[in-house]
Structures are given as C-alpha cells and as structure tokens.
Amino acid sequence: MTGGDGEREALLAAIRAALPEATRGGRLDLDRLAALLEPSQVARAEPFGLAWPGSRGAMEAADLPASGLLSPPLDLEVAGHAVIEGENLEVMRGLSARLVDAVKLIYIDPPYNTGKAFTYEDNWRLSARDYAALGGQGGEQGEPETQGRRHAPWLSMMAPRLRLARRLLRKDGSIFISIDEREVHHLRLLMDAIFGAEHFVACITWQRKKETASDGGGFAIKAEYILCYRRSSKARFANLPLSAQYVASAYRRADERHPEGPWRPVPITASKGHQGGGYTYAVVTPSGRVVERKWLCPESTYRRYEAQGRLYFGLEGDAIPQRVMYAAESRGVAPDNLWVDLATNKEGKKALVELLGESIYDTPKPVGLLRRILQIATRPEGGDLVLDFFAGSGTTGHAVMEANVEDGGDRRFILIQRPEPTGHARLATISDICRERVLRAAVALGVDTPIGLHRLEPAPDPPAGPPDSDARCPKGP
C-alpha cells in the first residue's frame, strides 16, 4: 500500500470511529456524512420507497425497443385466444404499442426467488463481485451484503415487466400477483412505486396446501399471498355469490308463505344517525299492535311490501315488521382477503395429471383459484382480455375457457411462456406443456374458439444500404 493509500485509510477509519452513523454496511456513505456535517446545506430530500443497486436500469429496460417478432403475427380478431412462446419481456415490448390500455385483468405467478434449483430459474443471487459492480454496499469487514445480492436481481427482473404490465392494463383493469413470504414485502414496495400506493387493493392470503409439514424455522407454511392492484380508481370489483353454507346458516327455508326460496328478514327501521332522516308513520301488525317508528322506506313502499306478503312480523305476528329478502335477490358479498375455501396446489397438480396423462409440472395453480379471480375482476360479456405473462402450465387459459362455458362469457386470454427445458421427451419445454394443456382443456370443455399458437422469432436484419450510402445523413420523407 502506498503512503497515499495509507493516509486515506487512516482518515476513513477516523471518520468511521467518530461518526459511525455515517456508514452503511461498513462503508462510508457520503450522503449521510454530508447530512451530518452540514444538515442545512443538504437540499436533496431522502425519498421514501424501494431502491436497490441496478434499479434505474431495470426500470428503463421497459422502454427498450422489441428485438423480435411474433410468428405468425397476433390477430385476436381471427383467434380469440393466444399462446405465445418466448421471453415475456421481449413479447410485452412488442405488444405494448398495439395493446396499450387494452387488458382488463393480468394474473401472474412469477418465480418466488426461493434459492432452490427448479426447472424454471428460481435463484436470483448475484456474486459479491457482480453485486458490487451494480453499486451494492459491502458488509462489515468486507463481507458481502447477502440479502441485497439475493433480492436485487429478482427486483430487476420484475421491474420492467411490471412497468409494461401497467401500460397494457385498461384504466378499469387490475393485476393479481401470486407470491410467497420471501418477496411479498419487496414486491409490494415495487408495486407501490410503479402503480402507486393509492392503487393497492388487497393482500390476499390463499391456503395453498392442507397438509402440515415442517418447512423450516419451526413453522408449517400452508399459505401464500396474492397482491392485487388496480390501474386507476375506475377499477371495480364484483361481489361473489352467496355460498351454500352461508345460505343454509343465514336464510330460513322456503315455506308456504314464502315459497320463492330461502329467505331472511331485513330490518326496515332507521337507526340513530341514519343519513336521510327516514320516514315517520304508524303501521298495524297482524295482532293489532300499532307501531310508530322512523322507517327507511316511505309509506307507499311499505304498503307495497304489505300487499306482496313481503313483511315478517315475528312468530306471534306482533313484532316490529321487517322486509322479507330472498337469497336469489342478494347482490352477493364483497370478496375478502382470506381464501381457505378453494382448491390447493395438490389438487391443481392432480387435475393437470388427469388432463395430460402424466406428471410433468410440479406446482400448477388450481383452476379454482383463477376462477375466483375472474369472478372478481372480469365480466362475462364485453370481451374482457386476460393476460398471464408467466403462464407456466396454462392454468389461466384453462380457467378463462371454463368460466366462459359456465356463464356464457366471451373473455379472451393471452398466455406468454418462455421455453424453459423440462427434461421430458415429449413435452420438452414448459411452453410445450402450456400449449398442450390449453388445447386439451379446450377439447374437454367443448370450446370451439380458435386458439392462436405463436413464437417469438428474432427480428430480421435491416436491409443494407447502397455501398456509397452515408448512415450519418438523415433520410428524406
């Protein structure tokens, strides 16, 4: 070490000793040092949010031009659905111009960054040298910051894809993302940065398995999460129909006075503080009791209920009247953020094995999970477009077709999956599995809507100019 280097190291050591709060990960942080020495001179505010080494480049990657072309070209007027084999970032760059503000629902099940070796890359850890090259800070005594090295590359992979996803969503569209506890906190901050924290809708907990097993740390991990964000405040979510269990517990059975089906009494008296004031008048019960109250409905409406036999006065006929509401009239219930009544991953794998005739793909999401999301975020009519750019085994496409068969809908889907090798002789890539699954599901469901099969091909080289052309000269109109 030269004398200059020694003096520099001694100075840095003295600063670290005198101002330990000016260090980050064992290294001197010049921004922190400036704020400590001259806080009044530091004009740059410290932003709140997520930052990681390489974040700026990752965000800008969404704006690069597409480097490939779809073969054959995508035409949703000819084929209502599409399965695309190719790198999703490149495909989405190519789709961003023609499908901007066109997608009603996006669902993705990206790699969870578990650090394990799966068929689909699921370990995004950088080497210490590569992480430092991105601007990552080292740990104490030069130890690498292992957490940053693990999470930064995963975030850099997700960021440009999510930026493009937002561009593709309609103003009333929404995105649902499956994730586990390893990255859910980082993903939520990333989504806040791209979609806006004000457009966060819910963090749904889904029971992915029922079996109890030791998954490490002394806890059995049975659940994972689904983050839901909307593109804008125009997005609306549908209620879910009443479950048979709820109807059985909350509604009375049909009887001779109310043969239209299960029913329940609903109060029509105005509570204290009710906005609108209510309506005050007297009514007479079947027992002859006179009841004067402030009611939610005008007297004309009450008389109509009375004429229709839609009032309930209790078992003795002398209680305060209530309106009879049938289960068939219910507008349903708002979806909650705890989903324990759906199929699990085990059931999803079983269904896929039955469809393909063999076990190839280990962790497919069950169709029932996607059906729930479709219920909430799409309508049967209107041709809602559904996109899944981590399509995996094709569960999303399967669910869209099944939902359309059940409710007569005309939803469409686009699935994107890159050709990750599986080691299987017949279905050599995950994109092969996706195509096969969707085509077989269409046959099983009796779906006759054409499904376009596409591949991302390298873009052809531009034609060479004449030998004496000057590339620096701008071309005319």
Image: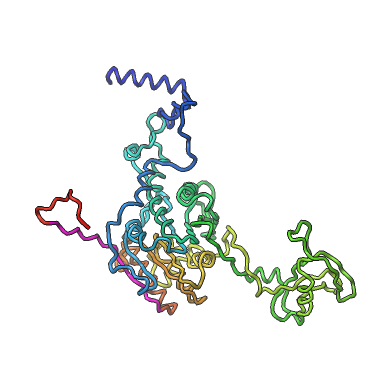
Between 428 and 77, the residue placed more toward the observer is 77
Position of residue 271 measured from the top left corner of the image (x, y, whole percent): 78, 60
Q: Which quadrant holds the N terminus?
A: top left
Between 254 and 291, the residue placed more toward the observer is 291
Residue furthest to the left in view is 467
Who's the residue at 57% across and 65% down the image?
Answer: 238
Task: Report which quarter residue 362 is drawn in.
Answer: bottom left
Between 27 and 457, the residue placed more toward the observer is 457
Magenta includes 459? yes
Q: Which residues are magenta?
A: 448-465
Between 420 and 254, the residue placed more toward the observer is 254
Q: State whether residue 242 is above or below residue 230.
A: below
Who's the residue at 35% across and 21% down the image?
Answer: 9
Q: How many marks?
A: 0
Q: State whether residue 203 is above or below residue 289.
A: above
Magenta includes 150? no
